[in-house]
Amino acid sequence: MQQIALDIAITPAPNLDAFLAGPNAAALDHLRLWVGDGAQSGQLRSPVPTYLWGESASGKSYLLKAVSEALRAQGGEVGWLDPSMHEPPEFNPRWVAVMMDDVQAYSAVQQQAAFNYFINAQTEQRWVLAAGSLPPADLKLRDDLRTRLRLGANVFCAASAH
């Protein structure tokens, strides 16, 4: 028996520079500004939340992961919440930002955790970047969470034609 060498490559981590913006240039520019050079040169980042919304396959999850990677590369810790996390962790004050993906699918437990993350992020002056399939007003979430998602920048993400 002869062993066959397989060309197996590790999938690169999501990266803002690798994102093909297409119709989502405004969303990409907003996120680059937030994680960019101004933050590294000592300018304070705005803790105002950002909510990306749009149809499936528009790149929302990729952008959340790319922002997380960029912040980690700068030495920051990042919180993450998505519908697969049945027992969300407690808010960590070391987090520089909290990412919330697919908020439209959150269970009651996840909605409670998300609201708690918002309150703690506001107290600690941390950024919340969230994504969902609908505009905040149309989300079937608890009122206090939906209100928090409406507070900051709301950026529509369109599916790309490529």
Image: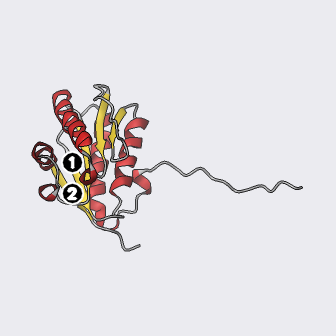
Percent coordinates x, y for residue 121 in the rendering: 21, 33
The residue at the far right in this view is 1
Q: Residues within 10 Å of mark 1 (few under 14, many from 20)?
A: many
Indicate the amino acid at tag 1: Thr
Above-or-below relation of 147 to 57:
above
Above-or-below relation of 49 to 57:
above
Task: In this rendered view, identify the residue nearer to me: 148 or 72.
Answer: 148
> Which numbered dot is residue 155?
2
Per the image, label 1 sits on a secondary structure element best described as: strand
Q: Say whether residue 44 is visible.
A: no
Q: Residues within 10 Å of mark 2 (few under 14, many from 20)?
A: some
Percent coordinates x, y for residue 23 in the rendering: 30, 67
Per the image, label 2 sits on a secondary structure element best described as: strand
Task: In this rendered view, identify the residue nearer to me: 116 or 10.
Answer: 116
Q: Which residue is mark 1?
A: 50
Task: In this rendered view, identify the residue nearer to me: 146 or 20.
Answer: 146
The residue under the point 33% across, 46% down is 82
Real-space Cα distance between discs 1 and 2?
8 Å
